[in-house]
Amino acid sequence: MSVQDVITTGTRTDRVVVEGDELVFDVRGTGAPIILLPGTPGDASAYGLIAEPLAADHTVITYDPRGFGRSTGNAPRQYEIGQQARDVLAVLRAAGVDRALVFGNSAGALVGLELAKHHPEVVEGLVAHEPPVIRVLPDGDDFRAAIADVYRTAWAEGAKPAFFDFLVLTQLPFNEGKPFSRAEVDVLRPNLGALPGLDFADFYVKDQMLPLTNYAPALAAIEANGVKVVAGAGELSIDLPFGRTSRRIADELGVPFVTFPGHHGSHTDPATADAWLAALRDALAAL
């Protein structure tokens, strides 16, 4: 059966108040618990193609991070990675789960690494898919300098031009599943400020981008904590920055590396969802 053919049934939606915000989460299925951590600006809907079929043999927990989807984001809105990990911990407890498998994509993978460092008792195993931890790369300092330029652009020219500069730098697939080239963005640049949508860009480039890309995962501590880890990346991302971070984590920890179909966000693509889910199951089996 295709994941697109599965009808969502029996999903329980609940809420938990954490450090001043109300987080909304969903629980479905039975079996070994797994929580799916979305990248930014994603929420529980990012796993809309994956959660239900995975619930055939897992208790699947999805949630909306603070400030996204159905969860609140009260002022002053900030992004702090330790808080993000505490949010996951609170969601698990509110869902009645003491210990779970953890899958995280992009920023969610980074939060998973933070959870494995500070709250290893709740992590049955972690699959980290393309976390933006550029500090693990040999050329990480160059990337951080370029991202500092993006941050300056956000205040000088606006969030949307800065966000497109970030996309060019990181080669994320926002261009109909393909990365933007510098030439393409230069053509678009005069009108980027008026581009509709991308409402999250201001918060991302001014508040999230630096905490995420400056984060240094405590790999030695995660290993000492005994947390089982599998790293993964899309087949189209392996030589791109966040695919390289996953490979580096796998090499430094000496853990399995799993190749997923597609790119950084292919779990949201109906064309690759079935194969992507199969790769996730392979990654979970490798823990």
Image (cartoon, rainbow, N blue to C red):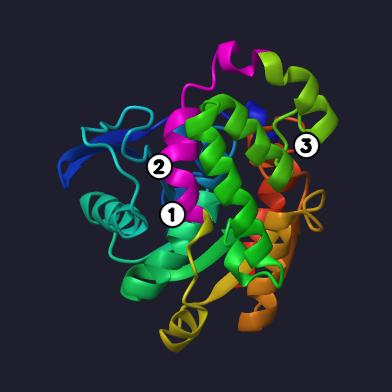
Chief secondary structure of the magenta span? helix
Task: Reply yes or no: does residue 164 show up in magenta.
Answer: no
In space, the residues marked 1 and 3 are separated at their CA atoms by 23 Å
Local secondary structure at mark 1: helix
Question: Pointers 1 and 2 in contact (CB under 8 A)?
Answer: yes
In the depicted structure, whether residue 19 falls above or below residue 8: below
What's under tag 1, amino acid-wise? Pro
In space, the residues marked 1 and 2 are separated at their CA atoms by 7 Å
**Residue carrying label 1:** 211
**Residue carrying label 3:** 179
Of labels 2 and 3, earlier in sequence is: 3
Among the 4 quarters of the image, the one containing residue 251 = bottom right
Out of 120 and 177, give the one closest to the viewer.
177
| Residue drawn at point x = 45 percent, y = 29 percent | 202
Label 2: few (<14), some (14–19) or many (≥20) C-alpha neighbours in 10 Å = some
Among the 4 quarters of the image, the one containing residue 115 = bottom left
Q: Position of residue 25 (x, y in %)?
A: 32, 39
| Residue drawn at point x = 57 percent, y = 11 percent | 194
Q: Which residues are magenta?
A: 191-212
Question: On the rendered image, what quadrant is the C terminus found in?
Answer: bottom right
What's under tag 3, amino acid-wise? Pro
**Residue carrying label 2:** 207
Out of 100 and 203, give the one closest to the viewer.
203
Label 1: few (<14), some (14–19) or many (≥20) C-alpha neighbours in 10 Å = few
Local secondary structure at mark 2: helix
Number of the label disc, if any, that sits on residue 52: none
Q: Position of residue 256 (x, y in %)?
A: 69, 74
**16 with respect to 34 (left or right):** left
Question: On the rendered image, what quadrant is the N terminus found in?
Answer: top right
